[in-house]
Image (spheres, helix red, strand yellow):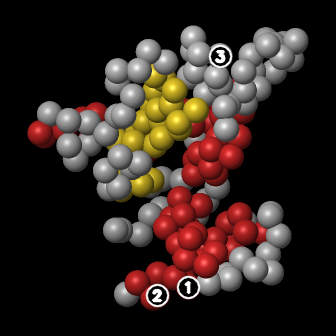
Amino acid sequence: MPKLKPLEHWICDTCSEAILEPNHGYVEWRSGYGTGEGAHSFRIVHHAPRSPRYAKGGTCYQFNDALDQSTLELPHFLGPHGVVLLLSLVDVGLHHDPNRKERPAKDLREWANVFRRLQLPYYEEARRYWSRATNEGYFEDLNEIAIYQSARMRKMIEYYERDDS
C-alpha cells in the first residue's frame, strides 16, 4: 500500500485500494429515508469510472439497489464546506428543524469515524495501525483528544511503518 497523503488519499471501503485523488472518490451512505432511522453505513469508495472493478463491469458502490442510497463526490466533504455538510448529517440546525424532528445520524461513533477520515490529517493512514497500537499500549497514557492530534498520528504512522519495511 502506498504512503497516503493526508486529506488527499483514502482507502476504498470496498476494494481496499488507495483513492489517490479526491475527485476519484465518493462518499455513500444510507439516508434512513422511509425507515425512521438516521443516516448510517457511511463508506468512502472509488467513483465508478475510477474503480479497479470498472473494467470488468463492476464498481465499488455497495448500496446501488437501496431505496435510501445517498452518494456525493468526496470533494464536497473536505475543508470547511465539508465540515458543514457532515454536521448537517447529525443536526440540520435550529432554522430547518426547530423541534428536532429530523433524525440525526443513526450511530454517532460511525459518523465520527467518517468525519475523522475526511477532516483529520493522518487519521486515514493511522487507521491501518490502530488495532495494533491499541493492543501494544501505544495510546495508554493519552487522553481522548491527544490520540487524534495530527502530530501524534503522524508519529504513530512513522513508528509502525518502520516495522512494515
Residue 153, above or below 96? below
Quick one: SS at disc 3?
Answer: loop
Q: Find numbered disc 2 in the image and state the secondary structure of the residue it sits on.
A: helix
Residue reaching furthest front?
Answer: 35
**The C terminus, quarter of image:** bottom left
Can residue 155 be seen in this snapshot? no
Q: Earlier in the sequence, mark 2 or mark 3?
A: 3
**Callout 3 crowding tier (Cα within 10 Å): few <14, some 14–19, many ≥20:** few
Q: Kindly tell me whether residue 97 is visible in this rendering.
A: yes
Q: Residue at x 57, y 51 (%)?
A: 117
Q: Are marks 2 and 1 in contact (CB under 8 Å)?
A: yes
| In-front residue for pair 135/61 | 135
Q: Is residue 33 above or below residue 128?
A: above
Spot occupied by residue 56 in the image (x, y as percentages of width and height): 11, 39
Q: Which residue is mark 1?
A: 159
Indicate whether 17 appears above or below 137. Answer: above
Q: CA distance from mark 2 to mark 3?
A: 47 Å
Q: Residues within 10 Å of mark 1 (few under 14, many from 20)?
A: few
Q: Is residue 122 left or right of residue 13?
A: right
User: How far, Cα to Cα, is label 3 from label 1?
Assistant: 44 Å
Tag in front: 2 or 3:
3
Q: Is residue 57 left or right of residue 125?
A: left
Toward which corner of the image does residue 150 lie, by quadrant? Answer: bottom right
Q: Amino acid at mark 2?
A: Arg
Label 2 sits on residue:
162
* Dot 1: element: helix
Three-letter code for the amino acid on which mark 3 is drawn:
Gly
Instruction: Please state if 146 lies on the left or on the right of 75 as rendered.
Output: right
Q: Position of residue 21 (x, y in %)?
A: 39, 48
Q: Is residue 135 above or below residue 87?
A: below
Which residue is the site of mark 3?
36
Q: Nearer the viewer, residue 48 or 144?
A: 144
